[in-house]
Amino acid sequence: MNWIELTGHFGAFLTSVTFVPQVYKAWQTKSVGDLSLVMIFIVFISTIVWLIYAVSLMLWPVIIANGIVSVLSLLLIYFKFTFKK
C-alpha cells in the first residue's frame, strides 16, 4: 500500500468518525432538539451520492467512509423522530 492509499484510508477513517460523538451524545442524553433535520438529511443524501460514485469506481476508502456516515446519519434521523418530547 503506497502513501496515497494510506492517505485515502486515513481520510476515510477521519470522515467516518465525525458523527460518532454526536450520535453517542444524542443516544446518551436522548436529546436532539438542537440538531437540524434538514442538515442531517443533506448529509445523508450526499453520502448516498458519494456511495454511488465510489461503488461505480470501486474506491474502497470512499465506500467505507460514506457507508459509515450514512448509517450514523440514519441513526440521527431515527433519534430525531424517536426522542421528541
Image (cartoon, grey):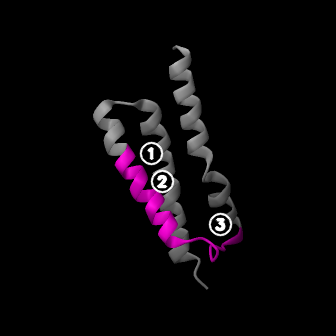
What amino acid is found at the position of numbered circle 3 in the picture?
Answer: Ala
Q: Earlier in the sequence, mark 3 or mark 2?
A: 3
Q: Residue 22's x, y, as percent? A: 65, 59
**Mark 2 and mark 1 in contact (Cβ < 8 Å)?**
yes
Vertical placement of 9 versus 27: above or below?
Answer: above
Distance between mark 3 and mark 2 Cα atoms: 15 Å
Query: Which range is magenta?
Result: 29-50
For numbered disc 3, what is the local secondary structure? helix
Distance between mark 1 and mark 3 Cα atoms: 20 Å
Q: Residue 50's x, y, as percent? A: 38, 45
In which quadrant is the C terminus drawn?
A: bottom right
**Mark 2 and mark 3 in contact (Cβ < 8 Å)?**
no
Q: Which mark is residue 71?
A: 2
Residue 50 located left or right of residue 34? left
Distance between mark 1 and mark 2 Cα atoms: 6 Å
Q: Which mark is residue 24?
A: none
Crowd class of label 1 (few under 14; some 14 to 19; many from 20; radius 10 Å) = some
Residue 20 located left or right of residue 52? right
Q: Earlier in the sequence, mark 1 or mark 3?
A: 3
Which residue is most to the left?
A: 56
Q: Residue 73's x, y, as percent? A: 50, 58
What amino acid is found at the position of numbered circle 1 in the picture?
Answer: Gly
For numbered disc 1, what is the local secondary structure? helix
Vertical placement of 75 versus 2: above or below?
Answer: below
Crowd class of label 2 (few under 14; some 14 to 19; many from 20; radius 10 Å) = some
Crowd class of label 3 (few under 14; some 14 to 19; many from 20; radius 10 Å) = some
Q: Which residue is rendered at x = 44% and y = 58% of the image?
A: 44
